[in-house]
Amino acid sequence: MVASRSRSQLTVQSFGDVSRFLRSGVADEESRQLRDSIGALAQQIDDAITTRRAAPTAPAVPDTPEITRQAANLMKCVREHQLFVTGMGSAWHALYEMGSYQLALRSLRRAVEAWHHALAQRSPLEGPAFDRVELLSWRTLGEGLLLIDMYEQGENVHSEPASRPKPGSAWQRALAWLRRRRK
């Protein structure tokens, strides 16, 4: 269940890189579906942020209908992804990381809504709202990647020989995951 290339070689420097990484993984069906959904979210984030950054910076509030459209599309994509995540199986919801991911998604959704509202109102607060969306996008995608990794690590624990005891709590699993990454 490990991606074909070594994770130590992975460098994610853009939202598009996150999307490509998620498509490259090999996983079970639920994991693949979540990877696809997070990948689509990462692509939509990339589209919105690229469009916003390409806008001329001379006016205090960019006057581009395309940016507002991209913000609306991102808002819709985040909502759809939240619904998808909510409907995932109990094995996912049993993970501590699921709660963190859902919290990050709610924060991102509120930030995108605030950014879209600032764009529609031509508010001078659009710039800070956009900066918050970008920051929370990275946090949310990081939480999503951690969720997938912890789920897949749990899958690998079940398929390993019985000689290795399974860590009990989420905290113990996280510590075990960190130790494996340092090797």
Image (cartoon, rainbow, N blue to C red):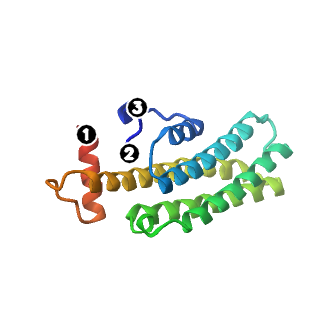
10 Å crowding of disc 3: few (<14), some (14-19), many (20+): few
Are the two marked residues, 3 and 1, in contact with CB atoms closer than 8 angstroms?
no
Please tell me in which quadrant of the rendered image residue 80 appears.
bottom right
Please tell me in which quadrant of the rendered image residue 64 appears.
top right
Q: Earlier in the sequence, mark 2 or mark 1?
A: 2
> Where's the N terminus, which quadrant?
top left
Label 3 vs label 1, nearer the camera: 3
Please name the residue that numbered disc 3 is placed on: 5
Please name the residue that numbered disc 1 is placed on: 182
Q: Amino acid at mark 2?
A: Met
Tell me the CA gap for discs 2 and 1: 19 Å
10 Å crowding of disc 1: few (<14), some (14-19), many (20+): few
Kindly state the secondary structure of the residue where label 2 is placed: loop
Q: Amino acid at mark 1?
A: Arg
Marking on residue 170: none
Q: Earlier in the sequence, mark 3 or mark 1?
A: 3
10 Å crowding of disc 2: few (<14), some (14-19), many (20+): few
